[in-house]
């Protein structure tokens, strides 16, 4: 499963890129608002210098012409920009029109399997079911992920399922187990995925045992 970072914070993206686990980035207007510093376009351009993977840029226009204009403008920023279009009747049309122009899209705000299926048929390369927001209203968000993964496999649909609205490490594990193609993960959740208390205590213990095992005052080298 590919890991995307769900953020518009450039320093978080640089950090995860250094870890060697970054496959792409998703942004949205809320994440842009939290990041601060510069226009959305300048932040997107900078992100595209850090990763060659897909970088999702979300339109805010609700009419077709506005969606198309924003989408075309984002697509000019870098070759790896994927235009994020919210699911709706107009959104489907925008996805279809942008596909005809060779512009890749990510259909966002997907909350049902049928929405995801239609978005794929319209031509979105990424389909984003929002797991956490469904969980929030007492529905199992992972069901949509599982069903879309299965339907895309059965019908040989080339779009990729991108599990979004990931709130904790278990969501990432369950998405991977479901065969989901991509999970987009907030930086904090990715850090939670890295750490384990037994790893931390194990590192401390090994270092302490190593130090104890060093002969004293005979010129032998210690670890550092
Ligand atoms: C990413 O593509 C989505 O916009 C994001 O995962 C939404 O997450 P949230 O439900 O935590 O806002």
Image: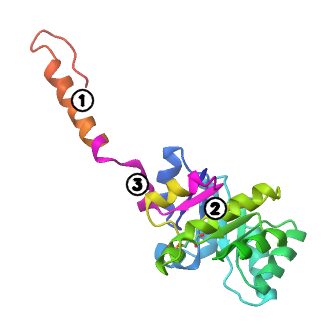
Which residue is farthest top?
A: 218
Label 1, label 3: how far apart the Cα atoms are:
22 Å
Q: Secondary structure at mark 1?
A: helix
Nearer the observer, 141 or 26: 141
Residue 206 badge: 1
Nearer the N terminus, badge 1 or badge 3?
Answer: 3
**Is residue 184 on the magenta stretch?**
yes
Task: Give the residue at mark 2.
Answer: 146
Nearer the N terminus, badge 1 or badge 2?
Answer: 2
Q: Is residue 204 above or below residue 11?
A: above
Q: Are marks 1 and 3 in contact (CB under 8 Å)?
A: no
| Mark in front: 2 vs 3 | 2
**Is residue 152 on the magenta stretch?**
no
Which residue is rendered at x = 76% and y = 90% of the image? 63
| Mark in front: 1 vs 2 | 2
Label 1, label 2: how far apart the Cα atoms are:
41 Å
Q: Secondary structure at mark 3?
A: helix
Q: Position of residue 66 (x, y in %)?
A: 77, 87
Q: Position of residue 67 (x, y in %)?
A: 76, 83
Task: Give the residue at mark 3.
Answer: 191
From this viewpoint, is residue 156 visible?
A: yes
Which residue is rendered at x = 60% and y = 61% of the image? 25
The verdict on label 2 being within 8 Å of ligand 1 is: no
Nearer the observer, 173 or 103: 173
User: Based on the displayed image, in which of its 4 quarters is residue 71 positioned?
Assistant: bottom right
User: Based on the displayed image, in which of its 4 quarters is residue 180 positioned?
Assistant: bottom right
Query: Which range is magenta?
Result: 175-198
């Amino acid at each position: 499963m590919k890991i995307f970072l769900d953020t518009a914070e450039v320093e978080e993206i640089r950090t995860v890129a250094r870890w060697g686990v970054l496959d792409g980035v998703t942004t949205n207007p809320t994440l842009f608002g939290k990041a601060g510093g510069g226009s959305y376009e300048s932040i997107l351009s900078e992100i595209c210098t850090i990763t060659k993977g897909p970088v999702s840029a979300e339109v805010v226009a609700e009419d077709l012409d506005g969606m198309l204009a924003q989408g075309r403008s984002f697509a000019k920023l870098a070759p790896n920009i994927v235009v994020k279009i919210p699911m709706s009747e107009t959104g489907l049309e925008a996805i279809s029109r942008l596909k005809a122009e060779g512009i890749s899209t990510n259909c966002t705000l997907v909350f049902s399997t049928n929405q995801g299926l239609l978005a794929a048929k319209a031509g979105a390369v990424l389909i984003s079911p929002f797991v956490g927001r469904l969980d929030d209203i007492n529905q199992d968000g992972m069901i949509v992920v599982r069903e879309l993964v299965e339907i895309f496999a059965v019908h040989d649909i080339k779009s990729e399922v991108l599990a979004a609205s990931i709130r904790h490490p278990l969501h990432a594990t369950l998405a991977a187990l479901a065969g989901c193609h991509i999970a987009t993960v907030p930086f904090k959740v990715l850090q939670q995925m890295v750490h384990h208390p037994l790893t931390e205590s194990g590192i401390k213990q090994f270092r302490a045992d190593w130090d104890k095992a060093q002969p004293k005052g005979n010129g032998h080298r210690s670890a550092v």
